[in-house]
Image: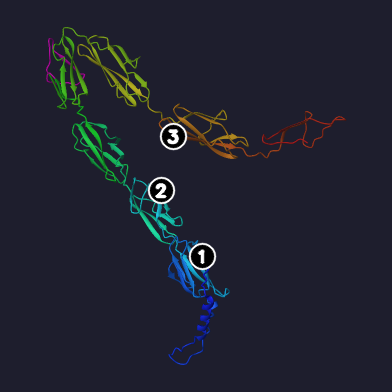
Amino acid sequence: MKTKTPNSLVFRLGALVAATLMVLVPTTGMGNFATAAYAVPADQDTSLATFTIDGNAVTNGATVNADYGTSSVDVVATPTNVDATVDISGDTGLVTGPNTVSVVVTAADSTTTKTYSVTVDVASNGDASLGVFTVNGDDVVSGDTVNLPYGTTEVDVIAEPADVEATVVVTGGTDLVTGNNTLTVSVTAADGTVVNNTVTLVVSENGDASLGVYAVNGNDVNDGDIVELPYGTTEVDVIAEPADVEATVVVTGGTALATGPNTLTVSVTAADGTVVDHTVTLKVLANNDSSLANFAINGEDVVDGATVNVAKGTTSVTVIADASDPDAGVVIAGNENFTTGTNTLTVTVTAADGTTKTVYTVTVVVAGDEFSNDTSLSTFKVDGTTVSDGDEVVIAQGRTSVSVEAVPNNAYAFATVAGNTNLKAGDNNVTVTVTADDGTVKIYTVKVVVSTPSSDTTLSSVKINGNTFTGSLNGTGEYQAAFGTTAVTVVATPNSNAASVNVSGTSGLTTGNNLVTIHVTAETGATADYTFLVVVAAASTNTDLSTFKVNGTSVADNGIVNLDYGTTGVSVEVVTSSDSASYTVT
C-alpha cells in the first residue's frame, strides 16, 4: 500500500530549515552549543509515525503472537513524511508458525527506501480433545467406567483426535486382570498440550458356580441324582471341587443319615458371589436282612432243607421262626393239615426293604404203615449232560452257575440242589440231596471245574528255516548258517493255544554268534524266554577244486591236454571245494 501526502515540497523545506537549526545540547546542562547533528533531508525520510498490527504498536524486527487459525492481520503503517509511500506485504495468507509481515517505506525522493519487518507467529492448534473414543464399539468419555465379562483380557479401543495434527497413545487396554484396570488415552495437541483421558475397565469376577468334580463314595453324581445306599449307612464320602479354583464349597447333609431319603447339598459360591446349590438325594435302603435268628419245629432247631420225621397221625407242628431283623416280616405256611408221608413246610422272610425274600423249606415226614427208602435218581443232568455221583464236569472260564436236573425214582422222595451258583474258578462241589419218604437221605456230588487261565509258557516245537531245531534253548544251542546269511525264519509253537509268541534277533545277522530270543507270554501273563545262537560261518579261504575237467576229462593243476588240430575251444567244468568260493575260467 502506498500513501503520498500533498504539499510535500513545503514539508521538505520546513524540515530542512529545522534540520539546519538542530544542535546538540551537552548532557551536563546548559552551556555552549556542541557540534550540530546532521539531519536527514526531508525528502529522504523513511521513518514511520505509526506502525501497528491489530492495533498494537510494533517496531522493526519485533515478533507478534497470533492465535491459532489467524490467517491475516491488520497492519497500519503511517510514514512520518506524508509524501513518503508505504507498501505492506505478508499480512494475509498466514499459516501456523512464523510469518513475515513487511512494510517498505519509499521516501519522498522516490529513491530512498527502508523495509520494516515483523514476525507474526501463528500459534499451533492446542486442541487435545478426542473426536472418537469407543471401547468395544461403545462411545465413552474420560471418567467413564466400563464393565466387562469375567476373563476379558483386552478391549478394542478406537481413539481419534479432533485435530488431525494431534497424536494419540493408548495404554492399559491389554493384559487386563479381574477387578479395576485403567485405560488411558493420552492426546498430544499440535502445540504440545497433553490431555489424558482415562476410563476404568472393570473385569467382573468369575460367576462360575459349577462343580468340576462331584462324587459320592467314589462315584460321579450330578445335581438331582438319587444315590441308593446300603442299609445302616450313616455317612458318605463326598468329593466336591468347584470348576473355578476361586469359588468356595460348603457340603451339608452327608452325615447322620437315616433310613430313607436324605438331602446332600453342595453349595458353591462363585468368585463374584453367585451361589448355586447342587443337591443329591441319598436314599438309605431299608434292611435287606431276610435271615432267621431262630428256627425250630416242635422245640428242635432246624435249618433250611432239613427233614423232620413225626409220628403217625400227626397233623400239625409248632413252628418258631424269629427274623434276625425285627422289622422283617415272617409268614409260616404248611405247618398243619399234614397227611401221611412227606409234607412241605415253608417259612418266608420278607426283609424290611420289602423286596428281599428268603424261603426256608423243611420236609415234615408223617410216619405211615409202609415207607420207601428209595433215594435213587431217574434223571441226573448237569448243563443237559447226564452225570453220575462223583463225576467231574469242566466248564468255561468265567461261568458262575450250571443247570442241574435231578428227578428221584420214588415219587414221594424229593431232591434239593445246592452249590450250582456263585461258582468260583477251579473246583466246586454241586450236591443233590435226595430224601426218601421214610426219611432216608443220600447226597450225590459232582465236581464242577471252572476253567482257569493257562500259565503254560512251554514250547511244543521250534523250526528254523522250516527245519526242526533240536538244540538247547538255554542260550547254548547253535544253528549253523552259511556265510553271508543275514536272516533266518523261526517258527515257535507254544503248547498252550492261549499263549502268544514273539521272536527277536532273526534279522540283521552278522558273521559269528547271533542270539535269537523266543518270548512266550501265557494266558495268565506269565512269561518265559528261550534263546539259542545262530552261528553264521566266516568267509572260506579254501581255493581248492573238487572237480576240474576239460572236455569231460579230469585234469590236474598245470596238467597238459592234447587237442586235435584246428580245435578252437574246449568245455571246462569247475566245482569249488567251498560253497562260498567263486571262480573265473580264462
Location of mark 2 (residue): 156
Kindly identify the residue that appears in the image at 72 percent across and 36 percent down: 583
Q: Secondary structure at mark 2?
A: loop
Residue 153 lies in the magenta-colored region = no
Q: Secondary structure at mark 1?
A: loop
Amino acid type indicated by mark 3: Thr
Location of mark 1 (residue): 90
Between tags 1 and 3, which lies in front?
1
**Spatial separation of the CA atoms under disc 1 and disc 3:** 108 Å
Amino acid type indicated by mark 2: Asp
Verify CB contact (< 8 Å) between mark 3 and mark 2: no
Q: Is residue 364 above or below residue 219?
A: above
Kindly identify the residue that appears in the image at 52 percent across and 75 percent down: 7
**Camera-side residue of 529 and 423:** 423
Residue 475, percent from left and from top: 51, 37
Task: Determine which quarter of the picture holds residue 348.
Answer: top left
**Mark 1 surroundings within 10 Å by alpha-carbon count, few (fewer than 14), some (14 through 19), many (20 or more):** some
**Spatial separation of the CA atoms under disc 3 and disc 2:** 65 Å
Residue 493, percent from left and from top: 49, 28
Q: Magenta segment, which residues?
A: 297-318
Location of mark 3 (residue): 527
The furthest residue to the bottom: 32
